[in-house]
Image (tube, coloured by chain):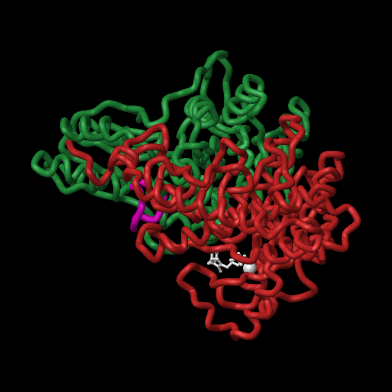
């Protein structure tokens, strides 16, 4: 538990607690919006996994680059994307990070170094290795952080991308955010051997396994690994073990897990855990409740703003396909 | 003027672009030893192993990492060795490279070139001979180039490298050795513009890549019979030069499209359909498509030859339209 760590910094933990609440509140609003038909496509909430986002992404520098997944709202917010723009994106509206053309699964904010979520499991691993390749070619001092789920380790890009990062000694931090599930299947049942860290180590990449619900611990280890990468230590691997408290998507009731197990896991909710540590060290209940209220207020406002935002203009349909060639093939008139 | 082979032209294009722009780099299997066909011979000596980079046999990582490197501000030129192996990186090309610009709302482009040596060459059989250009044309976001001459290989590869979008660049293996006199200073060509190989009034033959040679040979045969054939080399398949083709067929009233690829679902179908839609009333004969039958490419030479579209087949197709 965070409380037992010698270098506990209450102010810092309180800030992380506040930021985890922002992610939670964002996703709760997004789920509500989906139920109202305002969020159009599938969303994958990370409820229960916020310590990974805040701990790992929150420990990156502004100039670091990030590649995320379909379950990336928390990562994107933590990298610095605007909650309003993100909500607009989920609503498919103008002013979304991608102008309403990407949605939750393909969200990106290049202005804060967030180079994309990805709708294809594991596809971000090679892309991250390549971004790190560019960083090295250009002689820049920054790292690339690549977050993927536990099921991505069973796809080919995991082997190819990690090997790539190793042989080219690239400045990339791989973070396996292990929520124990691959959609509706327990990843454990479909994964041979001792798991992600051993696989990384087999490729010569140092790996650390941490309790992914301990926000301070995830942050501490991320900071350490980031430092090693910047010192020329090559790729590093972090296996953060957490648990997905809600369904695979916002409409998945997750009936394949029994209520008792889920209830037990809620006791280990990373936000509650951080709150408990803070409370034990004398942080006032009002302060903690204030974090929640502020987050909910911010995200409700984002919801309202997104709801009021216009749809993208028709011209957006044809914009940004490619520089040359007329994309209106089907409508071509002679 | 310098006598330059199709292969040397590709190398020269890459070298000139690398000298001009430090963000251009190449990556692929065996590049440090010049590449499987020798297209990169001597380049590592000039540019070093960071910019002429070897790669593990990891096609998905080669292409996927190129996407990341492009998003992060460099211009990778990816060597796929054989077009057939690019199929190990379809997600990276189709779902990632081709989509990023659009789905991220124009925040970042993917300026990468994927070199895919294509086509039948030295009995390479089913997994090393395919012409899959039509697949790529089908994917919004990709530019597709298939040069037929050394000069076009030089100029269009330069243009492809300077393009801010992903380009599938298909060099035909059977053209590596053909030569042409090229100038000392050859600026980039225009992607999307066809070349009129030979002018004519009686029929139009459209082709690209190595098939252009056969189309030109067929036109030669027909000229001896007093038939004047216009031969068009499309050079770029997306975007393709509809204007040049439609203008030609408007005059000739006859179209034969000749391709090495399987005819079913091939790019020739797109050309044929476009011309039929635009010129139905002006056509003097039904449009004719020539291509390979829908079978894997066999190893034995006589069998392989049976699926080639040669000059005679093209000439016969034109004769049948007269
Ligand atoms: C290549 C591919 N196969 C299947 C899917 C469908 N899919 C979407 S999310 C998901 C589960 C991914 O599990 P994990 O990587 O552990 O991430 P999590 O969803 O748990 O965050 C699957 C199988 C996909 N998006 N991409
Ligand atoms: Mg998972």
Q: How many marks?
A: 0
Asked if the magenta segment contains residue B46, the reply would be no
Residue at 16% from the left image edge and 30% from the top image edge: B251
Q: Nearer the viewer, residue A264 or A172?
A: A264
Picture residue at 56% right of the left edge, 38% below the top: A110
**In this image, A226 relative to A127: left or right?**
right
Residue drawn at (88%, 52%) of the image: A7
Please provide percent x and percent y for residue B28.
Answer: 67, 43
Image chain in green: B
Occupied quadrant, residue A204 = bottom right
State whether residue A239 appears in this view. no
Left or right side of A14 for A186: left
Residue sticking out furthest to the right: A6
Please state the extent of the stretch shown in magenta in the rendering.
B259-267
Is B275 or B72 nearer to us in this picture? Answer: B72
Chain depicted in red: A
- Residue nearest the observer in this picture, A202 or A30: A30
């Amino acid at each position: 538990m965070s409380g037992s760590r010698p270098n506990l910094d209450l102010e810092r933990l309180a800030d992380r607690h506040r930021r985890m609440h922002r992610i939670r509140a964002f996703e709760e609003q997004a789920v509500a919006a989906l139920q109202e038909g305002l969020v159009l496509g599938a969303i994958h909430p990370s409820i229960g996994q916020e310590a990974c986002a805040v701990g790992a992404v929150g420990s990156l520098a502004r100039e670091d680059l990030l590649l995320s997944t379909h379950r990336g709202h928390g990562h994107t917010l933590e990298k610095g994307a605007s909650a309003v723009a993100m909500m607009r994106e989920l609503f498919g509206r103008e002013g979304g990070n991608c102008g309403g053309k990407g949605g939750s699964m393909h969200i990106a904010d290049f202005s804060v170094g967030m180079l994309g979520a990805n709708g294809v499991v594991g596809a971000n691993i090679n892309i991250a290795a390549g971004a790190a390749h560019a960083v090295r070619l250009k002689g820049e001092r920054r790292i690339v952080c690549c977050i993927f789920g536990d099921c991505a380790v069973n796809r080919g890009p995991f082997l190819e991308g990690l090997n790539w990062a190793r042989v080219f000694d690239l400045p990339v931090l791989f973070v396996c955010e292990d929520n124990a599930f691959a959609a509706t299947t327990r990843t454990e049942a479909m994964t041979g051997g001792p798991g992600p860290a051993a696989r990384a180590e087999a490729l010569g990449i140092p790996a650390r396994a941490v309790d992914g619900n301990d926000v301070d611990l995830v942050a501490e280890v991320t900071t350490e690994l980031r430092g090693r990468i910047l010192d020329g230590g090559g790729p590093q691997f972090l296996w953060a073990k957490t648990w997905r408290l809600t369904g695979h998507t916002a409409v998945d009731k997750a009936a394949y897990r029994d209520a008792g197990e889920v209830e037990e896991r809620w006791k280990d909710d990373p936000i509650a855990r951080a709150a408990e540590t803070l409370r034990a060290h004398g942080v006032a209940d009002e302060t903690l409740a204030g974090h929640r209220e502020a987050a909910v207020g911010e995200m409700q406002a984002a919801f309202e703003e997104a709801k009021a935002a216009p749809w993208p203009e028709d011209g957006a349909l044809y914009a940004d396909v490619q520089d040359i060639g007329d994309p209106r093939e089907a409508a071509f008139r002679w | 003027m310098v006598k330059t082979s199709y292969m040397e032209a590709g190398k020269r294009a890459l070298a000139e672009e690398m000298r001009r722009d430090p963000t251009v780099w190449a990556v692929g299997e065996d590049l440090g030893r010049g590449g499987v066909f020798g297209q990169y011979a001597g380049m590592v000596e000039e540019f070093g192993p960071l910019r002429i980079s070897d790669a593990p046999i990891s096609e998905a990582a080669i292409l996927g990492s190129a996407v990341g490197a492009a998003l992060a501000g460099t211009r990778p030129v990816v060597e796929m060795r054989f077009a057939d192996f690019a199929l190990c990186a379809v997600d990276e090309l189709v779902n990632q490279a081709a989509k990023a610009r659009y789905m991220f709302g124009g925040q970042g482009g993917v300026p990468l070139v994927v070199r895919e040596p294509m086509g039948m060459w030295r009995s390479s059989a089913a997994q090393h001979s395919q012409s899959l250009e039509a697949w790529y044309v089908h994917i919004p976001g990709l530019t597709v180039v298939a040069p037929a001459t050394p000069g076009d290989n030089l100029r269009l590869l330069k243009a492809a490298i300077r393009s801010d979008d992903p380009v599938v660049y298909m060099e035909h293996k059977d053209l590596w050795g053909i030569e042409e006199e090229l100038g000392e200073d050859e600026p980039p060509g225009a992607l999307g513009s066809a070349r009129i190989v030979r002018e004519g009034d009686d029929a139009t033959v459209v082709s690209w890549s190595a098939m252009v040679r056969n189309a030109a040979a067929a036109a030669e045969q027909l000229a001896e019979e007093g038939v004047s054939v216009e031969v068009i080399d499309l050079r770029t398949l997306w975007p393709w030069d509809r204007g040049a083709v439609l203008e030609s067929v408007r005059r000739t009233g006859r179209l034969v499209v000749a391709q090495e690829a399987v005819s079913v679902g091939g790019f020739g179908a797109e050309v044929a359909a476009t011309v039929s839609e635009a010129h139905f009333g002006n056509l003097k004969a039904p449009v004719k498509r020539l291509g390979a039958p829908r079978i894997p490419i066999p190893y034995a030479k006589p069998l392989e030859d049976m699926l080639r579209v040669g000059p005679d087949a093209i000439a016969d197709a034109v004769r049948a339209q007269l």
